[in-house]
Image (cartoon, rainbow, N blue to C red):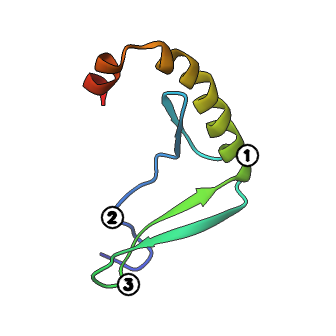
Amino acid sequence: MARGEHRFKSRGNYIQGRFEEPTDPNGEWASVSPADTADELARFRYAFRSVDDAVAAAKAASRAWRRRPVAERAELL
């Protein structure tokens, strides 16, 4: 694999049932192989705003989730 090419392509953050790339990234981090840390697998952009969006989506989803019977939640997991 040529330098600068990555094995994995980021699809973005998965929030509220869809993948979205950050529109206002604050930075980027690299995922490296644990077998060879010189082998960069992918680079991911991140945005602090995405954390806020993910927390808000999780809070909204938790209301409906906790109303489901435990057996149904276990089956879904």
Name the amino acid, label 3: Thr
Badge 3 local density, few (<14 within 10 Å), some, or many (20+)? Answer: few
Q: Are marks 2 and 3 in contact (CB under 8 Å)?
A: no
Percent of width and height locating residue 3: 40, 80
Q: Quadrant of the N terminus?
A: bottom left
Q: Is 6 situated above or below 45?
A: below
Q: Is residue 22 left or right of residue 6?
A: right
Residue at 36% x, 59% y: name it: 8
Badge 3 marks a residue whose secondary structure is: loop
Q: Which residue is mark 3?
A: 37
Mark 2 / mark 3, whichever is N-terminal = 2
Residue at mark 2 = 7
**77 vs 37, nearest the viewer:** 77
Task: Judge by depth and name the residue closer to the eye, 2 or 21.
Answer: 21
- Against 73, residue 19 (above or below) is below
C-alpha separation, residue under disc 2 versus residue under disc 3: 14 Å
Q: Which circle, 2 or 1, is nearer the viewer? A: 1
Instruction: Residue type at mark 1: give it.
Output: Arg
**Residue situated in front as seen by the camera: 63 or 23:** 63
Q: Is residue 75 above or below residue 43?
A: above
Cβ–Cβ below 8 Å for labels 3 and 1? Answer: no
Residue 28: x and y in percent read 61, 66
Which residue is outermost to the front? 70
User: Disc 2 on helix, strand or loop?
Assistant: loop
Residue at point 33% right, 64% down?
7
Q: Are marks 2 and 1 in contact (CB under 8 Å)?
A: no
Which residue matches tag 1?
Answer: 49
State the quadrant of the C terminus: top left
Q: Position of residue 36 (x, y in %)?
A: 31, 85
Q: Secondary structure at mark 1?
A: helix
